[in-house]
Amino acid sequence: MKIIALHFPITNDDIALCKEYIEPIVYPKNRLVDAEGKVPRYIYFVVSGFMRLFHFNDNGDEITTHINCPPGFITPYSDFVNETKTADNVECITDCELLRISKVNLDLLTQKSSAFRDFSIWVFQQSIAYNEKRAKMLATLNAEQRYRKLIDEYPEILHHVPVQYIASFLGMKAESLSRIRRQMIN
């Protein structure tokens, strides 16, 4: 509720609705919470822990497209909203404390609460902005610049996320990231 209250006024009724529709859940490290070929059932808010969104390319390699640093939301968003089968997987990188809400309950919540409706729109806008920023970063920065930008913006990621996931997220092989890291140390 604190993150919503930072952006939108909330009432006691909003808090009651939150308790009615949003479910706290804890998942262990390496737990797959959404799998390819299925319709994503929930959108997750990461209270603590790290999660990733990934898919497999034609060669069977895992491609990490999103790493969530808390606090934040994660799901294969367009598949969740459109209730379509996803090609993505959502996995807990570490033990995770989450809040989750189903599509049906999110729709009910946004109908009953203007604060949640406005917050939902804001989350969607932030998601679009994030994806545009990420696309621009991948298109315009070299591998070392992408890595430096990531550790400047999210230094805690280095302590919680395996190198192969970070490398994939940055659009490079783990060996390339290891070389970049060695060069930065020297």
Image: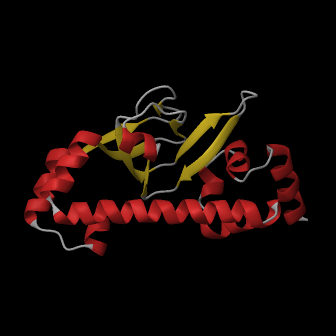
Q: Residue at x 25, y 71 (%)?
A: 5
- Residue 63 position within the rendered picture, expressed as x and y whole percent measured from the top left: 67, 40
Which residue is painted at 47% across and 59% down in the image? 127
85 or 151: nearer the eye? 85
* Quadrant in which residue 40 is drawn: top left
Would residue 129 be found to the left or right of residue 125 on screen? right
| Image point (61%, 47%), residue name | 65
Q: Estimate the x, y position of residue 85 in percent, counting from the top left.
A: 45, 30
State the quadrant of the N terminus.
Answer: bottom left
Q: Give the side of residue 161 with respect to residue 129, left or right.
A: right
Total numbered labels placed on residues in the image: 0
166 lies left or right of 106: right
Q: Is residue 39 above or below residue 150?
A: above
Residue at the spot 55% in from the left edge and 44% down from the top edge: 52
Please say if 136 is above or below 50.
Answer: below
Judge whether residue 9 can be spotted in this image: yes
Give the image location of residue 64, x and y in percent: 64, 43
Q: How is colour applied across the structure in the image?
A: secondary structure
Q: Split into 4 quadrants, where in the image is the C terminus?
A: bottom right
Question: Does residue 147 appear in this view?
Answer: no
Percent across and percent down for residue 154 are 60, 64
